[in-house]
Amino acid sequence: MFEDDRPRLRVLLDHFSLVEDEREQWRVAHPLPEVLLLVVCGTIGACDDFDEVVEWGEDNLAFLRRFLPYHHGIPGSRWLRILLNRIDPDLFSNCFISWAATLRPDAPALVAIDGKTSRGSHDRANGRAALHLVSAFATRERLVLGQEAVATTSCEQDTIPLLLERLAEKDRLKGALVTIDAIACNAKTA
């Protein structure tokens, strides 16, 4: 591991330390810090679903092992989906936003708001629909500042104000120009 890498990994893992691993530790082959590092790196690497995250992890295992051991390699996409569905999405989002804010504490110049459905995120066996997220993306930095899950009984128009309020209360939008696609062409969202 390079000397400069340890502090950055420690900052990432410190922000995600609020996410508890409720699994029986004697049965854990893939420790939660390894899983979280894989998911965050895969997401930053433009992966859209768990299959792509796993593929990215397999292609970049040597890189990941610079930070953590990954004794059992990369978990499968089905297992990864099951584990991450157990994590509170609001807590994960808050941890991610908190970590991302440390990368560039000053406000971005341009923030794009958009909603997307995560392919392969459904859990039909437990009656869970696919995850639909509204994201705030700092375009120049190429960094997601925050995400808000769209409730199953709601729509993007109801979720966008929630995301904007959460980002605004932490001054992450101060001085930024915010853009939203045509879904925001209603009085409530505008």
Image (cartoon, helix red, strand yellow):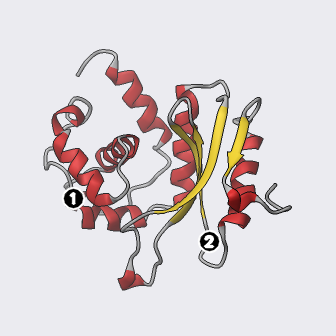
Q: Is residue 118 left or right of residue 102?
A: left
Question: Can you give x and y, in whole percent of width and height, for residue 151 in the image?
Answer: 62, 71
**Residue denoted by label 1:** 26
Q: Residue at x 33, y 50 (%)?
A: 32
The residue positioned farthest toward the right in the image shown: 187
Question: Can you give x and y, in whole percent of width and height, for residue 174 in the image?
Answer: 76, 32
- Tell me the SS state at disc 2: loop
**Residue denoted by label 2:** 151
Q: Amino acid at mark 2?
A: Ala
Of 12 and 128, the residue lying toward us: 128
Q: Amino acid at mark 1?
A: Trp
Please rate how many residues cluster around mark 1, counting C-alpha atoms within 10 Å: few if below 14, some from 14 to 19, many from 20: few
Q: Residue at x 60, y 53 (%)?
A: 114
Q: Is residue 66 above or below residue 20?
A: above
Q: CA distance from mark 2 to mark 1?
A: 35 Å
- Tell me the SS state at disc 1: helix
Asked whether disc 2 touches disc 1, contact meaning CB atoms under 8 Å apart, the reply is no
Q: Residue at x 82, y 54 (%)?
A: 190
Question: Can you give x and y, in whole percent of width and height, for residue 183 in the image?
Answer: 69, 62
For marks 2 and 1 on the same chain, the one whose residue lies earlier in the sequence: 1
Q: Is residue 25 left or right of residue 71?
A: right
Where on the picture, by quarter, is residue 179?
Answer: top right
Q: Is residue 123 above or below residue 46?
A: below
Q: Residue at x 20, y 34 (%)?
A: 65
**Quadrant in the picture for the N terminus:** top left
**Discs 2/1, front:** 2
Of 28 and 141, the residue lying toward us: 141
Q: Is residue 154 left or right of residue 8?
A: right
